[in-house]
Image: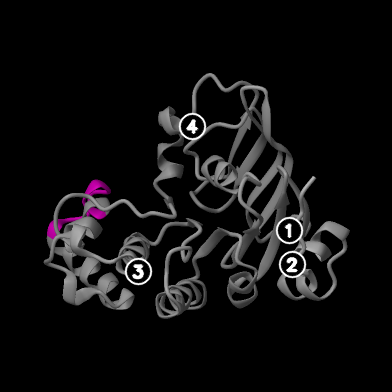
Amino acid sequence: MSATLTDLLIAHGIAKHFGSREVLRGIDLSVPAQSITVILGTNGAGKTTLLRILGLLDPADAGTVTYDGIIAEESSITYSTPLTGPAYDRRTLTLRRQMMLAFQHPVAFSGSVLSNVTYGLLLRGVGRAEAENRAMAALREAGIDERAHQHASSLSGGESARLSLARALALKPGLLFLDEPSASLDPHGTKVLEDLLLHMRDDLGMTVVVVTQDIFEARRIADQVAFLHEGSIIEQSSRDRFFEQPRDERTRRFLAGDLLVT
């Protein structure tokens, strides 16, 4: 999918090495605003590494990422050396505060479920009363408000995943990145999570990027799909075109259930 005026994120030429291993090579990716983009690929394809770079947690070795419309001015970050990561650059703080990244195994802070949601709001200067009201509303939307005053460590895996989305519902980031969000969930938990993602897109106008190896999940939630294979995006298109008219032979094989081994 080519970049358009509605793209919220545009990555060009992103490369990343870990020692002598080339993990990402020449990644081009566009993410339309108010959409769900699924980055699909097998284990080891580089999905999490790409997500961490786009979420400004880790630096790339080369390439440019442009975030347009997340903050008042367009922000473009060009990488040429990995000396310092954007997570430690105060110049990107305002931009990073408009993003949220939730990993496959969500991290819960010590304390109540409610405090886990209010924490980010308090850091952003929201008063405690308003923060607690917004947090409770988010927990209700996520369906775990009855656990608000219980310790976060008591949550099941599915409830922890919903806690991550409750944080996002409260903060309403410009970009939400999710790493294998339903990997450890049962069908009911997966349905709840996917319904929340569709609510975020349709009713709240949020922009979501999901990485997964689950073809069926991509079919259910994606507006567009990018197929990442061995460190390269080999195909990116709308969901219907991706699944019905894949252009690349490797994409066709992957969708057919073949093992893409070298």
Real-space Cα distance between discs 4 and 3? 31 Å
* Callout 2 crowding tier (Cα within 10 Å): few <14, some 14–19, many ≥20: few
Q: Residues within 10 Å of mark 3 (few under 14, many from 20)?
A: some
Image coordinates of residue 196 in percent, x first then y, are: 43, 75
Circle 2 sits on which residue? Answer: 257
- The magenta span reads 121-128
Q: Nearer the viewer, mark 2 or mark 3?
A: 2
Q: Look at label 4 and name its amino acid.
A: Pro
Task: Give the spatial CA distance, label 4 vs label 1.
Answer: 26 Å
Mark 3 residue element: helix
Res. 53 image quadrant: top right
Name the residue: 26% across, 77% down: 140
The residue beneath circle 3 is 158
Q: Whole-Å distance between the Cαs marked 1 and 2?
A: 32 Å
244 left or right of 161 in image = right
Q: Which mark is residue 86?
A: 4
Looking at the picture, how far across and down is residue 161, in whole percent?
A: 36, 64
